[in-house]
Every structure is written in structure tokens, then in C-alpha cells.
Amino acid sequence: MTQIKLGDQVVDLSGSLPAVSSKAPDFFLANNDLVNMTLKDFEGKRLVLNIFPSLATPVCSAAAHKFNELASDMDNTVVICISRDLAFSQKQFCSANNLDNVLFLSDMRNDDFANDYGVLHTNGKFQGLLARSVVIINTDGTIGYTQLLDQTGHEPDYGDVLNALT
């Protein structure tokens, strides 16, 4: 079992991020119009999954803004921001913040994504939310890179993500 921290509290996760070079687990996530999206919808594209607990926190919001900025320079790449926030809230957040270079998807329908990617908080204040992490899925559907933040209150290492994309 993987553990991270939320402040001083140790948090258990539902599993581990998929191994680099393994086949990416499929997902079933809702877009801002409540249309279900799967990995197949992005065939031929490289994906950067920015996974986080909730847009209602300052660090999650900052990371969404930073990935929106970085996404404009990424070729054949879709940056997907994934949280358990309701799709309605994600849509409102995007509109209010002019975030149009990233796609927001909600893991509100079931626990499959959270468990298949090993990012579900199973205890603590954020129990039931997703752990802050980044996963890159290559155009062939394999995992190219993973980053699990050991401290929920920290932003991803954007430099490492960009290096993994080159």
C-alpha cells in the first residue's frame, strides 16, 4: 500500500500508480457536459493526467492554472485535469478562470479510475478524494511517466513533467 502525507497526517492510498511502460488502465470519467469519456476517446494523442483532490483548494487551483499555461506549447498532447469535483463545478471553475487549454474530467461516477490508478485516499480528511499525481500516457497507450506527490500540499514538479514529454 502506498502512503503519502496530508500535512502531518499519513494517508493510505488504494494502490500504486501504474508502472512505467505498462498498458494504461482505461477510465470512465465525465466531462463538463456530463458526457462519459474513456481512454479510447484520445487514441493517437499523448495525455498528461493532472490528478488532484479538489479545485476548491489553493494548490489544486494553482496546478490547474499552471498546466493550462504549459498545455499551449505541447504538441499532440491533451492535458486532462481529473478530480472528484462535480462536472458542474469544474465547468464553472473553467469559465471563471478562462482555462481553455486543458480538459477537465470528473471521477464522480464510480471508484474505478481512483482504484485502477491507485490514487484514492482511503483515510484522513481527504478520504474518498484523489491523491495529487501526474501520469503521462504515450500515444501507444502505455504509461510514459508518473509522479506521485508525497505531500498533498505541494504542486507537481512541472520541470520533470516537461522533461518527460521531450
Image (tube, rainbow, N blue to C red):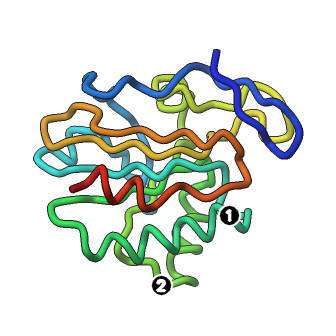
Q: Is residue 81 left or right of residue 97?
A: left
Point out the image quarter for the N terminus: top right
Q: Residue at x 29, y 76 (%)?
A: 72
Residue receiving disc 2 = 98
Q: Residue 32 occupies which quadrant of the picture?
A: bottom left
Q: Is residue 15 left or right of residue 35?
A: right
Task: Mark 1: give few (<14), some (14-19) or many (20+) Cα within 10 Å.
Answer: some
Q: Position of residue 117 (x, y in %)?
A: 47, 29
Q: Is residue 54 left or right of residue 74?
A: right
Q: Position of residue 11 (x, y in %)?
A: 77, 30
Residue receiving disc 1 = 59
Under tag 2, what secondary structure? Answer: loop
Under tag 1, what secondary structure? Answer: helix
Q: CA distance from mark 2 to mark 1?
A: 18 Å
Q: Is residue 54 left or right of residue 102?
A: right
| Amino acid carrying mark 1 in the image | Val
| Amino acid carrying mark 2 in the image | Asn
